Amino acid sequence: MLERKVFGSHLRRGRILNSGWSFLELPVAFAHPCGTRKSKCQLVRTGVTQTGAPEIIVLLYHNILPPRATLTEDIGSIPCDVLAEHFQILGEAGFVNVPLAEAFEQIVDERPQTGPPRFAVTFDDGYESLARYLPSLTPVVRPAVFLLTDYLGQCSSTWNTRSPTKLRHLSLEQALQLAQVGVDIEFHGVDHHNLLKFDGAELDERFRRGLTWFADHFGRHPRFLSYPYGACNDRVQAAAARYFDGAFSVTHGAWRGERARHAANRLSVSSFLRGEDLLAVVCSPPADRWHEQERRAPWRKGASRDLGHNVPRGPRS
């Protein structure tokens, strides 16, 4: 059992609201690491309103590390206290968390949205660490996890030749348990191959295999696909449209509108971003978000700023 303490959040139907932080019992892993310090986001809050926060954005994460962990070379692994800080800062800045399905409907609807800016949270690859941390996170945000169905229970070293770390994937039992506590389980692929290499018949076979697997184990078909590496073109998107309500990319698609229905961009969040940094990136124009994130990387700054962690550069899994 993880130690428990009070973690502030003001919730209604599982959403973070912009009216402040009351009390909710959560594991210490998701307690805000900065306590009651005066956050820079209080200074940014007015700027968000003046410059125009995004109406809706989907955040992409991968693996979760223990609190205050020294970061590995894999910038896709984020300590859970930093992750909690991300959600704390967004909530204080007025962002409301929504489930992925609700976010998707707002993304493809080109009409201006009313109300506060919204964000959804996704995790790709389905790593085992999610079984430990996401049950504590679901009262605060409602995440979606995209599974690689052929890799459940296996080590990422069986397929990920780029990553400098070895990570174990969720088992089927763990994935089912996450679904029971409200995590949205969706489809990342039968494996992690770049889909651009496959022709139409091969794509059909892979997608049908995934749908059959979901029907056998979850009793339903997945609504959404997350493209491995975010890679998709018109042909891949057309194949995805035959099987899924929507699909998510990273940079190969669109941020809003009908063009995003089977290629919705997400912000792939690197672990070196602290809360105020993430808020600044999120509130940047879409075309500038990658640059705004990259210029905050320690290797772009000569590692001159103390981030509180050792953050060597490395490829994302």
Image (tube, rainbow, N blue to C red):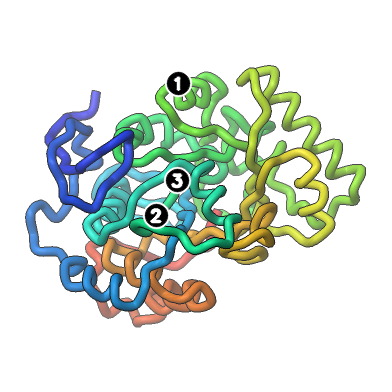
Give the mark toward the camera: 1 or 3.
1
Q: In the picture shown, does residue 54 fall above or below 162?
A: below
The spot of residue 201 in percent (x, y) is 92, 43
Q: Quadrant of residue 24?
A: top left
Give the mark toward the camera: 1 or 2.
2
In contact (CB < 8 Å): disc 3 and disc 2: no
Check residue 118 in the rendering and tell me which mark sits there, or answer none: 2
Q: Amino acid at mark 2?
A: Arg
The spot of residue 291 in percent (x, y) is 48, 78
Is residue 230 visible in this depiction of the protein? no
Looking at the image, tell me whether mark 1 or mark 2 is earlier in sequence order. Answer: 2
The spot of residue 307 in percent (x, y) is 25, 67
Looking at the image, tell me whether mark 3 or mark 2 is earlier in sequence order. Answer: 3
Q: In the picture shown, does residue 61 fall above or below 10?
A: below
Check residue 63 in the rendering and tell me which mark sits there, or answer none: 3
In contact (CB < 8 Å): disc 1 and disc 2: no
Q: Residue at x 31, y 69 (%)?
A: 277
User: Quadrant where the N terminus lies?
Assistant: top left
Label 1 sits on a secondary structure element that is helix
Q: Residue at x 35, y 30 (%)?
A: 135
Q: In the picture shown, does residue 19 fall above or below 14?
A: below
Q: Residue at x 63, y 47 (%)?
A: 226
Looking at the image, tell me whether mark 1 or mark 3 is earlier in sequence order. Answer: 3
Q: Amino acid at mark 3?
A: Asn
Check residue 180 in the rendering and tell me which mark sits there, or answer none: 1
Q: In the picture shown, does residue 295 fall above or below 79?
A: below
Horizontal side of 57 relative to 193 (left or right) equals left
Q: How many marks?
A: 3
C-alpha gap between disc 1 and disc 3? 20 Å
